[in-house]
Amino acid sequence: MARARSIGRFRLSPTGDPIESERAPAPGGLPLPGNPGRSIPPAVVDGARAWARTPEAAAGPAALEHPWGEGARRHARMVVVPARGPEGALTHFDVYVEDALPDEDAPDAPGRAFLESILETLPNPVFVKDEQHRWVLLNDATCRFMGHERSRLLGKSDYDFFPKAEADVFWAKDDAVFATGQLNENEESFTDAAGRAHVILTRKSLHADARGRRFLVGVITDITERKQMEDDLRRSRDELDRRVAERTAELVRLNAQLQDEDRRKTEFLAILGHELRNPLTPIRNAVYALQRMGPASGAQERPRAIIERQVAQMARLIDDLLDVSRIARGKVLLREARFDVVRVVRTAVDDRSDVLQAAGLVVETRLPEEARMVVGDPARVAQAVGNLLDNAQKFTDPGGRIGVELRTEGGGGAVAITVSDTGMGMSAEVQEHLFEPFAQPSFSLRRGGLGLGLALVRGLVELHGGSVSASSPGPGLGSAFTLRLPLSGGEAEPRPPEPERPRAGKRVLIVEDSEDAAESLGLALQMAGHEVALASSGPQGLEAALRLRPDVVLSDIGLGAGMSGYDLARAIRASPDLQAVRLVAVTGYGLEEDRRRAHEAGFDAHLVKPFDIDALCRVIERLLGPAGPAPRAGAEGRPAG
């Protein structure tokens, strides 16, 4: 037996290193009371440090004894108590030291008052239970947390204060600790005396005194607020997920709606192009026939020329409208080749020279004599340059000048084509939206047009990996547009020379449900030397083809009477008697998809209304030749037109 006298307290870090003492530290350990020259031997301090570094130390309070020195009758009695922060993490160990003196009448365990004083210094609720699950020791923090006086709790069990469901859980976990001796740490639900629900983190560990009695020591951390924050965060996340899902579903719906609207717009543009082209076709055919009827008086020639120019302008507007839509949907296919861009620009200027001169404009060109090779679609590059020339003409009054310059840039890696004018010019605000579809400044409305030409230029140039820009000193000071294309080395790909073929009349069957279009086309072809027959529907066309055995069938696509032009082409291709017949689609449907469908149905060529009669005659000659039908393009796997 021994008497105990409190010496003091010191603190160890989670790794067992001294970090604090109630008295100033002295060399070798802690100073002894009443004897300033002496200190706790290092062996005693090391004993506490050694225990603090064991896994069991963090489980709960532990009582240790260590002799003051070798052969000494006095012992240092220590209680090592782990301390934890609000989140349950170990922060330090408090080591309470007693001087145990030999005494026959002293108790065999630390005094109760000593243990209670230790527990009262701990911020967390701490309790001790015996093997009957009764509370035998509690600190004030436990009493406050449960909402009961200490006297009411001591000697009682969980079933005296908690709902049965909670008490069953506490009791079962206590039994597990007593049975296994293993540390138990888990979250539990807890209801205090006021009926408030808590979520607690409880650490329960098993300890035995000197007489072998076993006690369960529990340390409680209230994590209700943390769990509430986690629940709030989870609800916020769930609400965010719900809103994101709703917004995503709405965006998917709107995207599907936009796609459907885009599809219907595309279909509308195709139908619009078809319907607008149909009336232009007989007008152009009639103009062609008038040209072939013999010399016309000046009074007749002027209106004929006006009609021809306006038909060409209308055809260009329709093509621009459809081309912008195709570019926006990525439906434009470039027929790429290596070509001399200087020649393409010179040809584009020559093609418009008569129109520009008639408008009272002077055209100045600065083009190099040497070739500048570019890889791309020469027809589309010519279209872009032509649109810039048309734009310059549109906004330059008679007497003005238009300049066309081609030069190399970027150390010879790019070519720049600039079309400048002395026309109306523009402000910086106008330049910001200049290349957007349908974007027209107020002054542009007086000049006509759809506002598509420059948007089409940008789309075509970007398809070639180039760019386009505009500049102007200001209103009334003219403008300059520059498109840039990457250069490519090498020579231009040679084009096979067109064979000289004498024009010989062919037997042509026209299948067209528009009477004006059929008659005007038939008249134009007759004046070009061909023998022509007409049919107004698919079934009539098939019957006429079987009866007349024509050399070529020119068929519209949108035929009535239940048989389209595609159906007619498939029926002709299926007939053994009509294998030599060549098929040409003459239609207002001009999208790439329309060309693909025509080829798949069996057409050898595809012409978009309104087409030039001379171009049609060249297609007929190419397909048939002077010596008879040429091999079908379908046999080579590509459309002929």
Image: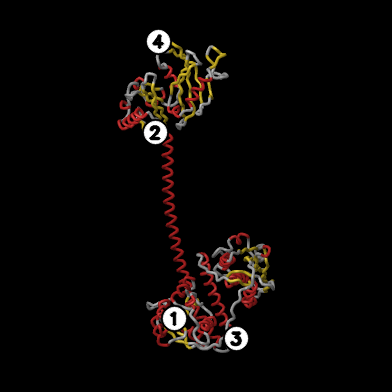
Task: Using a 10 Å C-alpha cutoff, classify the residue at mark 1 as few (fewer than 14 neighbours), some (14 to 19) or many (20 or more).
Answer: many
Residue at 41% over, 27% down: 219
Regarding mark 4 in the picture, which secondary structure is present there?
loop
Q: Which is nearer the N-term, disc 4 or disc 2?
A: 4
Indicate the position of residue 264 as horizontal and vertical percent values: 44, 66
Regarding mark 2 in the picture, which secondary structure is present there?
strand
Label 2 vs label 1: CA separation? 87 Å
Regarding mark 3 in the picture, which secondary structure is present there?
helix
Q: Nearer the viewer, mark 2 or mark 1?
A: 2
Q: Where is mark 1, residue-wise? A: 512
At label 3, the amino acid type is Gly
Q: Which is nearer the N-term, disc 4 or disc 3?
A: 4
Q: Which is nearer the N-term, disc 2 or disc 1?
A: 2
Q: Which is nearer the N-term, disc 3 or disc 2?
A: 2
Above or below 262: residue 620 = below
At label 1, the amino acid type is Glu
Q: Where is mark 2, residue-wise? A: 186
Where residue 539 sits, quadrant-wise, is bottom left
Q: Is residue 234 left or right of residue 378?
A: left
Q: Nearer the viewer, mark 4 or mark 3?
A: 4
Q: Nearer the viewer, mark 3 or mark 2?
A: 2
Indicate the position of residue 293 as horizontal and vertical percent values: 54, 88
Q: Which is nearer the N-term, disc 4 or disc 1?
A: 4
Say which mark, if any, is on residue 298: 3
Of residues 528 and 331, the one drawn nearer to the viewer in this rendering: 331
Above or below 372: residue 102 = above
Indicate the position of residue 561 as horizontal and vertical percent values: 38, 78
Q: Is residue 335 left or right of residue 78?
A: right
